[in-house]
């Protein structure tokens, strides 16, 4: 631990399957104190559970071992610590595997791991009771186990299901010697961790304003320089691609959140208190984050095997698309014995066609049929064969996008909670000593720090005159968006670059108007919106859009990654003054 200066925490993975070379790039690109990697998501836990069912010694992210083998020697030489949640369902197994890698390389590495999140043996404590036997049940732990392991001299710390931000909170708390009630500092570290957890999404990846990114190479991975008061600077290594700007950091802060009071196991971080400012080229200062005690329960992610599914897509070309689709659907399910033969059927007519299309491809639409059932035989060869049999007896121009496909198992995600008393947060130190990590003080969220009623500005009065003062423009000319999944819900973070546009956006995009703009699939769903004035932003939560989560969703975009860009494409009536303010700000 080195007090005083900020700790430089670099991320090298945003998901299981991210760029393997990123670990070496971050170690070689410049000085860092801690190398972190985020490998887990709800879907990843399901994937790891399937792997562990086949091999009980598995259940962790094996690609992490490849990265460790590549950089461990350099990290030990430079004193760079490695912290990752790649342990998944078997952190002890991964810790043993890291030791084997070190021994094979002739290196002496102190390896620790954090466990206690796996609740498959404590299902009775979960609220609501899960029913049945989920294949994974994991509480979201905080960063204090990581801090304890680093304090005991660990060179490598692997964990199971800690929160993504804990990979920054733990090292920052260790480095600066924070205590469990340093709420504002901890909240600042949560905000920094949330920014860098998804790797290059903070450095220009998936960013809507492409014209702002002048270096179009693959974006470098992010670094958080976390100071003793919890403030931070988000940056990247010199010479790497992409962009770090107030916009890219704002986009990531809004990613996959709900209300501004961001509940965590160590602290409640109030995202509506965060202030961002440019601090140099590819450097953004993140300050002002307020924190308050965490809730009295821990979030739990449950995954069940839901059954089996199969999807095939028919291509419809030219004229009479809707009539062809209805005819094909009727023929298909008549041959299968009816729709009621399956537990669930989802049929979507996806229209890409235009009249008098200038090319064959522009004249096509897709009829996408998904069936689900506990019996794999019904949704396997039987379903695919019935689809193929339409080849000579269906509609004119029949063909499919793929050959016959096989059934696959799908999972069902459910969020839950568990009392802290039912979870034993444990760190296993490099010498094998087991230490229980005490819970921080907890309590209700302080309403005055952040809530659904966050303050927001009132849009300026419309100038007198006819409706001609309004201009029909795509919403995306006024605001950026980043969307994603929160279990079965979708979130869309929207932000603007100037106060006039922010005030108009908040007043114009009511919940009812958002429902209209999002189209038929949101018509009957509950929509909430939350103001984040210090970011000139709002967050929109569309409840239930993704059903039982990404593994089960039948949407073509099951994680709602494109939902924000769809919303930005919709035409809205914008006051000319808003457009003039945007032009004065140099935005377009």
Image: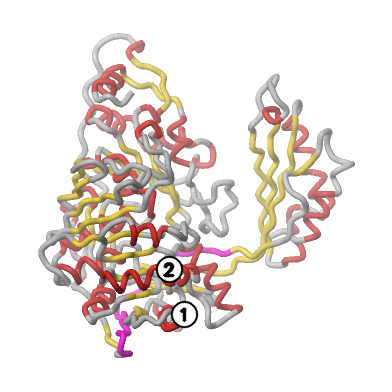
Question: Is 261 situated left or right of 418 in this image?
Answer: left
Q: In terms of secondary structure, where does tag 1 sit?
A: loop
> Observer-nearest residue: 212 or 288?
212
- Residue drawn 74% across and 38% down? 315
**For mark 1, what is the residue?**
120
Q: Position of residue 58 (x, y in %)?
A: 52, 78
- Given residues 122 and 389, the one toward you in this image is 389
Q: Badge 2: how crowded within 10 Å, few (<14), some, or many (20+)?
A: some
Neighbours of disc 1 within 10 Å: few (<14), some (14-19), many (20+): some
| Residue visible at 75% across and 38% down in the picture | 326
Does the segment drawn in magenta span residue 173? no
Looking at the image, residue 187 sits to the left or right of residue 326; the answer is: left
Horizontal side, residue 272 vs residue 385: left or right: left
Give the residue displayed 21% in from the left and 38% down from the top: 456
Above or below: residue 353 compared with residue 286: above
**Residue 483 versus residue 520: which sits nearer the camera?**
483
Above or below residue 95? Residue 493 is above
On the image, which quarter does residue 190 sit in? Answer: bottom left
Mark sitting on residue 70: 2
- Residue furthest to the left in view is 4
> Residue 430 is drawn in which quadrant?
bottom left
Image marks 1 and 2: residues in contact by CB distance under 8 Å: no
The residue segment tinted magenta is 411-432
Real-space CA distance between mark 1 and mark 2, rounded to the nearest whole angstrom: 34 Å
Q: Is 43 situated left or right of 433 in this image?
A: right
Q: Residue 423 in magenta? A: yes
Q: Nearer the viewer, mark 1 or mark 2?
A: 2
In what quadrant of the picture does the C terminus appear?
top left
């Amino acid at each position: 631990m080195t007090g005083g200066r900020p700790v430089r925490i670099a991320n090298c993975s945003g998901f299981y399957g991210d760029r393997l070379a990123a670990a070496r790039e971050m170690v070689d690109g410049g000085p860092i104190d801690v190398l972190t990697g985020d490998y887990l998501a709800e879907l990843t836990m399901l994937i790891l559970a399937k792997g562990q069912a086949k091999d009980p010694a598995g259940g962790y992210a094996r690609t992490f071992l490849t990265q460790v083998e590549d950089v461990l020697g350099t990290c030990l030489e430079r004193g760079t610590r490695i912290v990752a949640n790649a342990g998944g369902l078997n952190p002890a197994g991964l810790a043993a595997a890291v030791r084997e890698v070190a021994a094979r390389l002739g290196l002496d590495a102190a390896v620790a791991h954090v466990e206690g999140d796996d609740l498959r043996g404590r299902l009775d404590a979960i609220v609501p009771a899960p029913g049945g036997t989920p294949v994974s049940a994991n509480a979201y732990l905080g960063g204090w186990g990581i801090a304890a392991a680093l304090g005991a001299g660990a060179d490598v710390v692997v964990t199971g299901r800690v929160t993504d931000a804990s990979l920054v909170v733990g090292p920052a708390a260790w480095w600066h010697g924070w205590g469990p009630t340093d709420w504002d500092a901890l909240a600042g570290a949560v905000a920094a961790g949330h920014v860098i957890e998804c790797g290059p999404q903070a450095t220009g990846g998936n960013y809507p304003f492409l014209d702002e990114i002048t270096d179009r190479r693959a974006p470098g991975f992010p670094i958080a320089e976390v100071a003793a008061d919890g403030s931070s600077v988000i940056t990247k290594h010199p010479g790497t691609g992409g962009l770090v700007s107030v916009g890219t950091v704002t986009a990531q802060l809004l990613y996959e959140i709900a209300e501004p009071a961001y509940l965590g196991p160590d602290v409640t971080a109030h995202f509506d208190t965060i202030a961002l400012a440019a601090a140099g080229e590819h450097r953004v200062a993140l300050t002002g984050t307020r924190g308050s005690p965490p809730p009295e329960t821990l979030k739990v992610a449950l995954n069940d095997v839901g059954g089996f599914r199969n999807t095939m897509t028919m291509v419809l070309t030219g004229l009479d698309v809707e009539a062809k689709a209805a005819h094909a659907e009727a023929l298909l399910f008549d041959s299968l014995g009816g729709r009621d033969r399956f537990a669930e059927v989802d049929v979507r007519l996806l229209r890409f066609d235009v009249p008098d299309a200038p090319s064959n491809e522009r004249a096509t639409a897709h009829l996408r049929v998904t069936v689900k059932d506990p019996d794999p035989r019904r949704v396997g060869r039987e379903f695919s064969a019935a689809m193929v049999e339409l080849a000579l007896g269906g509609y004119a121009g029949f063909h499919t996008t793929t050959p016959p496909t096989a059934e696959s198992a799908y999972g069902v995600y459910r969020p839950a909670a568990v009392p802290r008393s039912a979870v034993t947060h444990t760190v296993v130190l490099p010498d094998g000593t087991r230490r229980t990590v005490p819970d921080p003080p907890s309590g209700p969220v302080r309403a005055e720090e952040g809530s659904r009623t966050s303050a927001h500005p009132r849009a300026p009065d419309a100038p007198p005159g006819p409706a001609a003062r309004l201009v029909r423009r795509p919403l995306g000319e006024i605001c950026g968006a980043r969307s994603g999944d929160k279990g079965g819900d979708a979130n869309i973070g929207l932000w603007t670059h100037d106060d006039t546009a922010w005030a108009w956006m908040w007043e114009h995009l009511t919940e009812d108007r958002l429902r209209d703009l999002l189209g038929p699939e949101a018509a009957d769903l509950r929509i909430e919106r939350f103001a984040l004035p210090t970011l000139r932003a709002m967050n929109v939560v569309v409840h239930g859009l993704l059903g039982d989560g990404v593994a089960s969703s039948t949407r073509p975009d099951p994680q709602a990654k494109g939902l924000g860009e769809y919303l930005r494409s919709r035409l809205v009536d914008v006051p000319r003054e808003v457009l003039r303010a945007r032009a004065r700000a140099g935005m377009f």
